[in-house]
Image: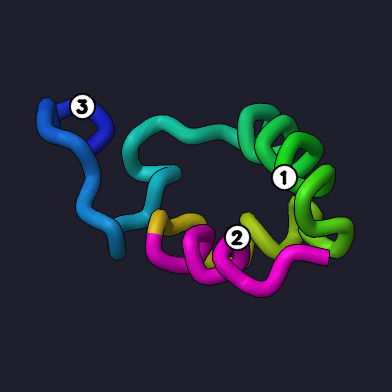
Amino acid sequence: PLLDETDEPLDDENLIDYGLDSVRMMGLAARWRKVHGDIDFVMLAKNPTIDAWWALLSRGVE
């Protein structure tokens, strides 16, 4: 999908295939840690999909 895909990724597609890199993922983890103190890069990297990240972010706020 990185080179051929012009559409937005589906919620269950790997965002790395769409060009997401580790530096951007670390930046997201840092921002989201302000809401959920336990979110870290490893949690995001284990399953880099919109669905997985939504599940992490929609948990009860600390």
Looking at the picture, how far across and down is residue 28, in whole percent?
67, 37
Say which residue label 3 marks.
Answer: 3
Question: Where does the N terminus fall, quadrant-wise?
Answer: top left
Residue 32 circle label: 1
Q: Is residue 51 left or right of residue 30?
A: left
Asked if residue 2 is among those painted magenta in the image, a careful observer would answer no
The residue mark sitting in front, 3 or 2, is 2
For the residues labelled 2 and 1, say whether their Cβ atoms are less than 8 Å apart: yes
Q: Is residue 41 left or right of residue 37?
A: left
**Amino acid tagged 2:** Leu
Based on the displayed image, in which of its 4 quarters is residue 9 positioned?
Answer: top left
**Amino acid tagged 3:** Leu
Identify the residue at image location x=79%, y=58%. Answer: 36
Q: CA distance from mark 2 to mark 1?
A: 8 Å
Q: For the magenta stretch, what is the residue range?
A: 51-62
* Structural crowding at the residue carrying mark 1, measured as other residues with C-alpha within 10 Å and reported as few (<14), some (14–19) or many (≥20): some
